[in-house]
Amino acid sequence: MHAITVSDLHKRYGDVRAVDGLSFTVGFGEVFAVVGPNGAGKTTTVEILEGHRHRTSGTVDVLGTDPATGGRSYRERIGIVLQDAGLEEDFTVAELVRLYRGMYPRRLDVDEVVALVGLADKRDARVKTLSGGQRRRLDLALGLVGDPDVLFLDEPTTGFDPSARRRAWDLVGSLRGLGKTVLLTTHYMDEAEHLADRVAVVVAGRLVACGTPEEIRATGDAVATVAFRLPAGVVPADLPELDGALLPRGAGWRLRTTTPTLALNRLTGWAVGRGEELPQIEVTRPSLEDVYLELVAAAGTDARPDASTPRHR
């Protein structure tokens, strides 16, 4: 039993296939990220899961319900945080959260939710006085106050500065602790890697990879980089034979290789044998973003972030 099951999902607009045979599952209490380039079908898929858009074919089940026919009883069990919610400017934070709370049969305490999203000190401030990051936290409070079983987060940290992004990440982590199922879309690969239990990479409406961040990283070419600096008086010609491409890097060198452990062993063994100390050495393995770009390039698609028009509440 899964919180979300999508099977052979299709959505067409005339000859355009926005979603083309998508299938995946999301477990209860899981944080699941959907990533992909422009026009990948991420937003269309999420809108179908929310019950806001009809599918052309395929089956969709969220919390044991077809979102297309679930009606009010279904909407009462989900929370939605959009890119741009169009908040009512003259309400205070507490007033707006209380207003939304009244629309749900299951309700969390207003002050509890306000504190959870880090707005306790802004409880009585009017929405129009909030910063952009504070508004996003209020968006999340409105999505949470109905105590949803599943929470949909659409680009939750777009426009955040680094410290605000980290606070938002901590908040999503706390939702996992509450047992909430979270499906988020993002174009930040570090965000997906940090937050998600599993990641789905969608390109041109099709699923090209799905798994834990570690599993997806393992599907790439696995070209690692060994970066190092040489001792004074030593030149690259003095180095032992290394498997890979050796390229200059500032005052040092970087070796791109598929066998970083072997390269590291040869470099350090060579240095020890000469009685030398390498001033700097580090190994960097492919990130989720590196593999994502490989997957998108293999599909022949532009890897830019999704630039679809933000949805409004």
Image: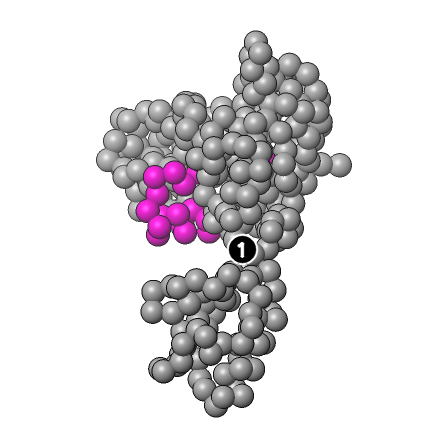
Q: Is residue 202 above or below residue 230?
A: above
Picture coordinates of residue 171, whole percent (x, y): 46, 48
Residue at image position (49%, 76%) is 239
Residue at image position (65%, 45%) is 211
Q: Amino acid at mark 1?
A: Pro
Quadrant in the picture for the C terminus: top left
Q: Dot 1 lies on which element? A: loop
Q: Quick check: is 160 in the magenta stretch?
A: yes
Quarter of the figure with residue 57: top right
Residue at image position (27%, 39%) is 131
Please provide the residue range marked out in magenta. 150-170
Residue 21 in sight here: yes
The residue where tag 1 is placed is 286
Specify the farthest residue to the bottom: 275
Quarter of the figure with residue 160: top left
Quadrant in the picture for the N terminus: top right
Q: Is residue 200 above or below residue 268?
A: above
Q: Quick check: is 145 in the magenta stretch?
A: no
Q: Of 155 and 88, which appears nearest the observer?
A: 155
Q: Of 215 and 268, which appears nearest the observer?
A: 268
Specify the farthest residue to the front: 237
Picture coordinates of residue 308, whole percent (x, y): 43, 25
Q: Is residue 132 left or right of residue 236?
A: left
Specify the farthest residue to the left: 129
Picture coordinates of residue 26, whole percent (x, y): 66, 38
Residue at image position (40%, 80%) is 234
Picture coordinates of residue 101, whole percent (x, y): 47, 29
Colour setup of the view: one colour
How would you rate the neighbour count of disc 1 (Cα within 10 Å): few for under 14, some for 14-19, many for 20 or more? Answer: some
Residue 146 in sight here: no
